[in-house]
Amino acid sequence: MNILVLSPHTDDGEYGCGGSIARFVSEGKDVFYVAFSAAEKSVPSEYPQDILRSEVKEATSVLGIKEKNLILLDYAVREFPDNRQSILDDILSLKKEFKPDMVLLPSTCDTHQDHQVIVQEGFRAFKDATMIGYEVPRNNLDFPTNVFVTLNKEQLRLKLKSVECYRSQMGHPASSMEFYECLARVRGTQVGVEYAEVFEAIRWVMK
Ligand SMILES: [Zn+2]
């Protein structure tokens, strides 16, 4: 089974679905991770502008993603709406290359302009695949909690370790390990286990 994670900016995939990535890798699934921007213009001034490029390499390798399965594109943060067609063309090429059975992408409730472009163009490109939208609490107006992926302790540990790799983002409360541990506990409690991540079912295709 091929799984493709579409991450608008380098950290979104780890924050939104890092535990599920660790679980899928441990189950022998092939996971591909594409980040569309290393958000150079948003990096705090005390860090090198390209720091997110090295942080994403470290964070995805912690989750078990092979180096060759990590693709870093070069769109400017907050300018995805102006590059919509080119982003769709890139997604269509990725589809041809990886032939994913399941795509993890931002949810349809995400209000960040770059995230909205990825979910809209992602839907256009992958109408024939299962698509689930990951949770980004600080961006979401609302969130249908209708797909749960349960996590064991080790999978949560790997997610938190990958979150910790983003040292340049640590100043934000929604980028802390504590925040993601609490969220995993809340989502786990909803389905009677210790930890889970939750997703919006955008499309479910049983082949
Ligand atoms: Zn983002």
Image (spheres, helix red, strand yellow):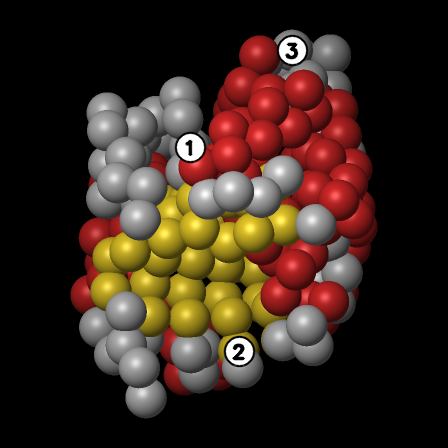
Q: Relative to 179, does residue 184 appear above or below in the rendering?
A: below
- Residue at 26% from the left image edge and 40% from the top image edge: 144
Residue 21 vertical position relative to residue 89 in the rendered view, above or below = above
Mark 2 / mark 1, whichever is N-terminal = 2
Cα separation, mark 2 vs mark 3, equals: 34 Å
Q: Amino acid at mark 3?
A: Gly
Q: Residue at x 51, y 54 (%)?
A: 149
- Return the residue at label 2: 2
38 sits left or right of 51 in the view: left
Say whether residue 61 is left or right of residue 124. Answer: right
Name the amino acid, label 2.
Asn
Q: Which of the two residues, 42 or 167, is positioned nearer the viewer here? A: 167
Mark 3 = which residue? 171
Image quarter where the C terminus lies is bottom left
Is disc 2 surrounded by few (<14), some (14 to 19) or many (20+) residues within 10 Å? some
Q: Amino acid at mark 1?
A: Val
- Residue positioned 44% across, 37% down in the render: 190
Q: Position of residue 12 (x, y in %)?
A: 51, 39
**How far from the left and from the top, in percent, is residue 193?**
58, 44
Say if disc 1 is inside 8 Å of ligand 1: yes
Q: Measure the alpha-carbon separation of dots 2 and 1.
A: 23 Å
Q: Earlier in the sequence, mark 2 or mark 3?
A: 2
* Label 1 sits on residue: 136
In this rendering, does residue 74 appear at all?
Answer: no
* Residue 29 located left or right of residue 183: right
Q: Residue at x 29, y 56 (%)?
A: 201
- Numbered label tally: 3
- Picture quadrant of residue 153: top right
Can you give x and y, in whole percent of width and height, for residue 164 in the image? 76, 30
Dot 1: element: loop
